[in-house]
Amino acid sequence: MLKLYCAPVTISTAVVCLLNEGAEWEPIRVDVRGGEQSRPEYLRINPKGRVPVLVTPEGLLTETGAVLEYIAETALPDFMPTDAFGKARVREVMFYLASTMHVNHAHLRRASRWADDPAAQEAMSAKVPETMRASAAYLEGVVEGPFLFGDRPTIADFYLYTPVYWLEGDKVDVSDFPKLAAFKAAMEGRASVKRAWADGFYG
């Protein structure tokens, strides 16, 4: 059985939602707010001090995109296209989320990762609504509807849902982006996402 080190409202919830689509798995909750991810016991599991970490029969996996791809390859193949271009489009979105949108969001509460000067940290935090809005505007042009690439979700949709969920806390009104708003509603209509909410991973 797969095991997932995860925490509410973090990007690990993307993996939670995908696993809820039908994989056999067990959550191992990490108290991120309490700093558990920075303690020696957890750093022995993931020296990066982040979630998610997926425990597989072959070993441990980190990084959300890699974890999602592994699950699609081994347990839930319906959520990854079979053609090369389709796979590349999925990765294109996931790489953007990892390299840009997630970083934009992290500047709000974790600006100390990039600067020690309190004024610089404050400036980075103040910029978040602008940068997250720019990310939302870009993705609005990517979503075909109701999901990223039409009627069937891929692993990229599960990745995208959490950053879209973050928008409200980052002072971006998702209703300004009709396709993203419809995407969010479509994802929240899935039993897997409803279960994640019921289990306290959102809200």
Image (cartoon, helix red, strand yellow):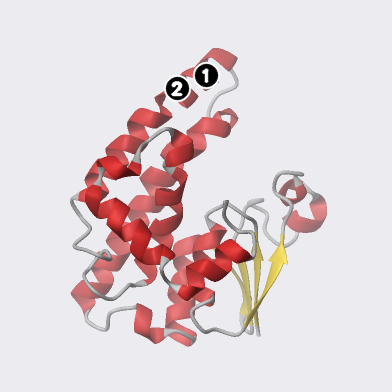
Distance in Å between CA atoms under marks 1 and 2: 6 Å
The amino acid pointed to by label 2 is: Ala
Q: Residue at x 26, y 40 (%)?
A: 176
- Tell me residue 55's x, y (percent): 65, 74
170 sits to left or right of 117: left
Q: Residue at x 57, y 55 (%)?
A: 202
- Tell me residue 9's x, y (percent): 57, 51
Near mark 1 (Cα within 10 A), the count class, few <14, some 14-19 or many ≥20, is: some
94 sits to left or right of 67: left
Instruction: Residue 67: tell me if it is visible.
Output: no
- Label 1: element kind: helix
Label count reads: 2
- Label 2: element kind: helix
Q: Which mark is residue 122?
A: 1
- Tell me residue 39's x, y (percent): 79, 49
188 sits to left or right of 182: right
Asked whether 189 or 65 is in front, the reply is 189
The amino acid pointed to by label 1 is: Glu
Near mark 2 (Cα within 10 A), the count class, few <14, some 14-19 or many ≥20, is: some
In this rendering, the answer to whether 106 lies above or below 181 is: above
The residue pinned by badge 2 equals 126
Do the CB atoms of the residues marked 1 and 2 lie less than 8 Å apart? yes
In this rendering, the answer to whether 29 lies above or below 24 is: above
Q: Residue at x 66, y 85 (%)?
A: 1
In this rendering, the answer to whether 130 lies above or below 6 is: above
